Image: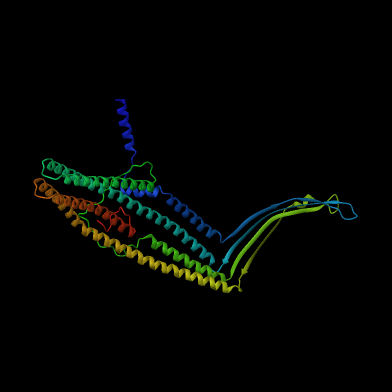
Amino acid sequence: MLAMWLACAFTAVWAAEVPSLTLAEALQRVEARNPEVESTQLAIEIAAIEAHRARLDRYTASVSATAGASAGVTKPWGQDAYGAAETPWGVRANAGVPLYAGGSIRAAIDSADAGAGIARLDGVLTRRALQRAAYTAYWNIKGYELQIAAAQEGLDLTQQALAIIEAKANAGLAAGIDVNRSRVDLYSQQEVLVAQRSSLYQAKQEMLRLLHLPGDQLVLTDEPPSTSGTGLDALPEGAGSARPEFQRTDLERARAEAAVRAARSGGLPSVVLSGSAGVGSAASGLVGASPRYDAADLRPALDASAGLELSWNLFDLRKTHDSVAMAKLAAQQVDAGAEGQKASIAADIRKAASSLLQLQDRAPLVDARVALARDNLQIVQDLYGQGSATILDLFNAQASFREARTQGATLRVDLAIAACDLQWLLGQDPTAPGPVK
């Protein structure tokens, strides 16, 4: 009795540890637990530091301190040796403020800001890619479950038909070959069912890996929508304009334009206001001789200076010209890529909408086919039991029902994935209500 209680308790604890997720929970978890998201977050922080440095690097400011001591002995030829010592020290501050730099400073800041924005959008794109992988894996698992349910229903009906065939064979109304053929068909269906369960297990393992969940069990609670009652509203105007790829392209264009301005600044003058101030001194002299080393010379002395520095490289204009030309070509390359990306996204959206509409048009037909195939199988099975149908008619009815049932299960999953794909391509949350309803 105690052993049974312990077994029941262990089973209850194990069952409680099996993750149970809705589609929305799965999408949230795949973002929270994936190292790719953490990597993009680190890239965002690095880009933010670079943008901060771009604002600070236009100024020059430094403070330096020096101190030292040296001593030595000198022996001239034919004279007595004497010692010498030196002790310098000093503290100096230097600062510089650019008054004009040909636009290079503003270009560097704009480029760094664009880089920070690109890093942020790369994080968004990474999360969206993970979302797509997660909802595709989610519905594929549900597809295997529906196919297994369809295969099990077909198997149950085949077992019922086998019982009828065996009864007729025992009564001498059916040949033994009919029993063998029905058993072979039953074994074949059982083999397919075993393979489908294995595929389901592998799909769940892949989902667990994607979600970074321990164990080998997973329960997905959301079901794909039924094939009836679906509909697609007209696509909104400017469909797909919310895609982060477009925002990223705008930032790439801004960074390319900043590169053009930075290249042009190479042929323009720069003016810098600089200043320096310091305090220090040095004591030096002979040890034990004249002039005598006196530590009192270490008393501090203060100095300060300020000035303007103009620099203009007039003899490297050809290099500047080539740099500007290359930067302009890079900007044109960004524009061309943006146009290609825009056309590709628009085509993907149209294709996804067309696929969803096609699946929705097929839905009532598939539903009707499943219902008719189920009725036909029952009718043929009854007729066979009465001796009014052949074994071949029965096998054909069984095969038609299994095919229709599997097709119906597949269509439900295809509809779910197509609806999520369209939402995703429009730049919307795949789990949120949108043009698909």
Reply above or below: 400 against 248: above
Q: Quadrant of residue 307?
A: bottom right
Q: Position of residue 48 (x, y in %)?
A: 48, 56
Q: Position of residue 87 (x, y in %)?
A: 75, 51
State the residue lying farthest toward the right.
78
Looking at the image, which is closer to me, 370 or 294? 370
Q: Position of residue 264 (x, y in %)?
A: 53, 71
Looking at the image, which is closer to me, 86 or 413? 413
152 vs 21, left or right, is: left
Looking at the image, which is closer to me, 248 or 175? 175
279 vs 375, left or right, is: right
Asked whether residue 232 is in view, the answer is no
Q: If the image is split into quadrants, where does the C terminus sit?
A: bottom left
Q: Quadrant of residue 350?
A: bottom left
At 38% from the left and 60% from the top, the residue drawn is: 244
Q: If the image is split into quadrants, where does the N terminus sit?
A: top left
At 17% from the left and 54% from the top, the residue drawn is: 369
